[in-house]
Image (spheres, rainbow, N blue to C red):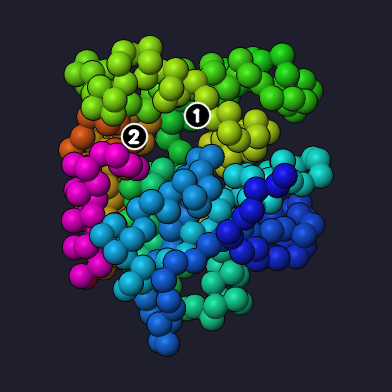
Amino acid sequence: MTAQRDDDIFEAGDVTLQSGTVFPSLKLAYKTYGTLSPAKDNVILYPTSFSAQHTDIEWLIGPDGVLDPNSYFVIIPNLFGNGLSSSPSNTPAPFPEVSYHDAVAVQHRLLTERFGISKLALVYGWSMGGMQAYHWSALHPDMVERAAVVCGSARCAPYNYVFLESVKAALTADPAFRDGLFLKKPVAGYRAMGRVYAGWAMSHGFYRDELWREAGFTSLEDYLVRAWDATFARRDANDLLAQIGIWQRGDISRCAAFAGDLDRALAAIKAHMLLMPGATDRYFDVHDNEDELGKLVNARSAVLHPIPSLHGHRAGNPINNPRDHAFIKAEIAELLRK
């Protein structure tokens, strides 16, 4: 039996991608929360992160949450490759190379063609969602009023790229991977990927202080088994590879408008920018945001407020983590007052 879906589909038709390839019948899955105001000026765009679907990140939306649907119309567009929008798992092979620029282009069509939206009160995103928020701010500077980049960056740093190479290598070492595709579920590959991710996603201090105990795990091995060994097995392995590629190619300046000039792309941004890295994030490093901050010369405002947490990259998605949740909620409330 197929699980019942609660999202809507934007049929984008045949789309010419940034690579020049035509993607036939491209589909963008999305879900909305709250009510669009008559002036259409209360919109928050909340793109998904790596391997996440809208149901994984909607916990942050609520009257007492970071994003309040009683005041704002929140839209979660599912990133290509996540199994809901066009992905290797639901598209005839071969699946073409897709970029954040392609994602933003189709998301823009969703907003303008389906809803008639011309202004975004906020683009909020964590991790790959944060990279999309950065792309939105550079590509549509007159549309984005505010952007919150949570544990994200304007481009994938070399160190971040290497992290993803280790994840990819662990996954594709499984014998189920042949000739560039997974022919069946890579059981060993999923576990290896989870173990690699566990070391990168959390900080040295997280393991030193045994913070996993706060979530009810009885030992380090119990934490690794229950929190990481199967965390990616819920997703199609070819979908995961597609999203790793999007992440590794991420760069707001990698387009005709900016011709690879990152400084020029950052200078194009006009929004109120909140850069909120995790203080102990190992692959979206605080220093990358520090470098970007000084180049946001035309932003209405630009601040760098690291999340003071030992939860590494996961500080930016603090489900069952009240302290980091409260920090992010306060920061977003302040941003929305600007």
Q: Residue at x 50, y 40 (%)?
A: 50
Which region of the structure is painted magenta?
A: 317-337
Q: Residue at x 65, y 63 (%)?
A: 9
Which mark is drawn over residue 231?
1
- Is residue 174 located in the magenta-colored stretch of the structure? no
Q: Residue at x 26, y 60 (%)?
A: 64
Q: Nearer the viewer, mark 1 or mark 2?
A: 1
SS at badge 2: helix
Left or right, 56 with respect to 322, comes to right
Upstream in sequence: badge 1 or badge 2: 1
Within 10 Å of disc 1 (Cα), the crowding (few <14, some 14-19, many 20+) is some
Q: Is residue 69 above or below residue 4?
A: below
Q: 223 or 46: nearer the eye?
A: 223
Tell me how far mark 1 sits from mark 2, CA to CA: 16 Å
Within 10 Å of disc 2 (Cα), the crowding (few <14, some 14-19, many 20+) is many
The C terminus sits in image quarter = bottom left
Left or right, 336 with respect to 5, comes to left
Residue hosting label 2: 313
Amino acid identity at mark 2: His
